[in-house]
Image: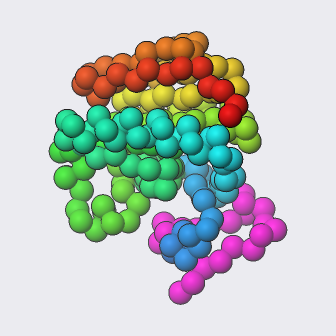
Amino acid sequence: MELTLPLLVDMQDVHLTDEQFYQLCIHNPELDIERNAKGVLIVMSPVGGDSGNREMDLGGELYVWNKQTQLGKVFSSSTLFKLPGGSDRSPDAAWVELSRWQALTPEQRKRFPPIAPDFVIELRSRTDDLATLQAKMQEYLDSGVRLGWLFNPQDQQVEVYRQGQDKEVKSLPVQLSGEAVLPGFILQVDPFTDE
């Protein structure tokens, strides 16, 4: 069964089962879709070259660290996680500790993993509303994410989100630590420039 979504539709009026949402995503790979906890579909805008390059740089640093430590699994922005609160979210980069990943069944790993990552990165693009991204970061924490970084090139800042703590805002340049979540991971972030 192929599901398609008309271009002109009020996303708040579309309510899909988990299986219908999965099929919609699989049969429409050109769409970048998330779903909030209320079941509302969120169509994500594509990013420009600068944002795409920054996203890859940040995720690449995480990948290199994990390749060396073998402590977990790293995921790209194409991975949709089925969070415990009922939403389906796709961070710009994510990491799951290895034993938690291995506890999932092979079928769960093939589909949208029903797990909150331990660590997420979100990068604000020119089309992203900051308040919406901040709410998404809080949703990650509420779902069990232990550490998250929200990069905001427009304000030359990064917001650090930790379980049970207020967010911390740091100005660029800055050196970020993966703390106990990502042992030994250090990321040097220089000011973002429009290239």
Q: Residue shown at 24%/56% (left/top)?
A: 104
The residue lying toward the viewer, choosing from 26 and 186, is: 186
User: In the current view of this chain or complex, which residue is farthest to the front?
Assistant: 195
Q: Residue shown at 40%/28% (left/top)?
A: 147
Residue 27 in the image: state x and y as whole percent.
55, 77
Q: Residue shown at 49%/43% (left/top)?
A: 56
The residue lying toward the viewer, choosing from 71 and 113, is: 71
Q: Which residues are magenta?
A: 1-22
Q: Residue shown at 28%/47% (left/top)?
A: 73
The residue lying toward the viewer, choosing from 194 and 20, is: 194
Q: Is residue 191 left or right of residue 148?
A: right
Residue 22 in the image: state x and y as whole percent.
49, 69
Can residue 86 be spotted in the picture?
A: no
Residue 95 in the image: state x and y as whole percent.
35, 41
Quarter placement of the C terminus:
top right
Query: Most prominent secondary structure in the magenta stretch?
Result: loop
In the image, residue 21 lies in the stretch drawn in magenta: yes
Residue 85 in the image: state x and y as whole percent.
46, 46
User: In the current view of this chain or complex, which residue is farthest to the right?
Assistant: 8
Which quadrant of the structure image shows residue 16? Answer: bottom right
